[in-house]
Image: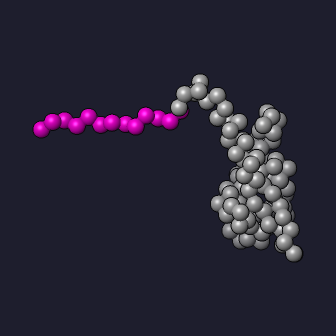
Amino acid sequence: MKNNDAVNAFLALGQESRLNVFRLIVQKGDVGLTPTQIHEMLGIPNATLSFHLKELMQAQLITQERQSRNLIYRPNAIHTAALVEFLLDNCCGGQSCLPKPLTRKVKAL
């Protein structure tokens, strides 16, 4: 992934309503959602929702498929995974970044 692609994705996700739309679409996975379903779940006005969906599509974070009269929006898993990989590339100098499990010292009675 190029820096410009990552910046575009972050700009798209940097608005609260778009972030909520993206998270909702990700939760539904391959099933996807129609704009009507997204509107009913999040209460975003249709014109505004259309704008947010367009921005997420331009950032390649979601895909759109026409099924008869409906548009179905799904997460673009490949691009999203590439974004996560881009963020974590060379993380922690190649060492595991996961915190070590905390161990509690138990006092002997």
Percent coordinates x, y for residue 30 in the rendering: 71, 63
Q: Is residue 20 above or below residue 34?
A: above
Q: Residue furthest top?
A: 93
> Magenta stretch: residue 33 in it?
no
Percent coordinates x, y for residue 62 in the rendering: 78, 55
Name the residue rendered at 68%, 57% in the picture. 26
In this rendering, position of residue 56 left or right of residue 27: right
> Quadrant of the image for the C terminus?
top left
Magenta stretch, main secondary structure class: loop
Could you say which quadrant of the image residue 29 lies in?
bottom right
> Quadrant of the image for the N terminus?
top right
Instruction: Examine the rendering and report whether any part of residue 45 can be seen.
Output: no
* 25 vs 43, nearest the viewer: 25
Residues shaded magenta: 97-109
Name the residue rendered at 73%, 42% in the picture. 82
Q: Is residue 6 above or below residue 50?
A: above
In this rendering, position of residue 61 left or right of residue 106: right
> Magenta stretch: residue 102 in it?
yes
Percent coordinates x, y for residue 14 in the rendering: 73, 45
Q: How is the image coloured?
A: one colour
Name the residue rendered at 80%, 52% in the picture. 56
Could you say which quadrant of the image residue 106 lies in?
top left
Q: Residue furthest bottom?
A: 69
Instruction: Examine the rendering and report whether any part of residue 87 can be seen.
Output: yes
Q: Residue furthest left?
A: 109
Could you say which quadrant of the image residue 36 lies in?
bottom right
Percent coordinates x, y for residue 54 in the rendering: 85, 56
* 80 vs 37, nearest the viewer: 80
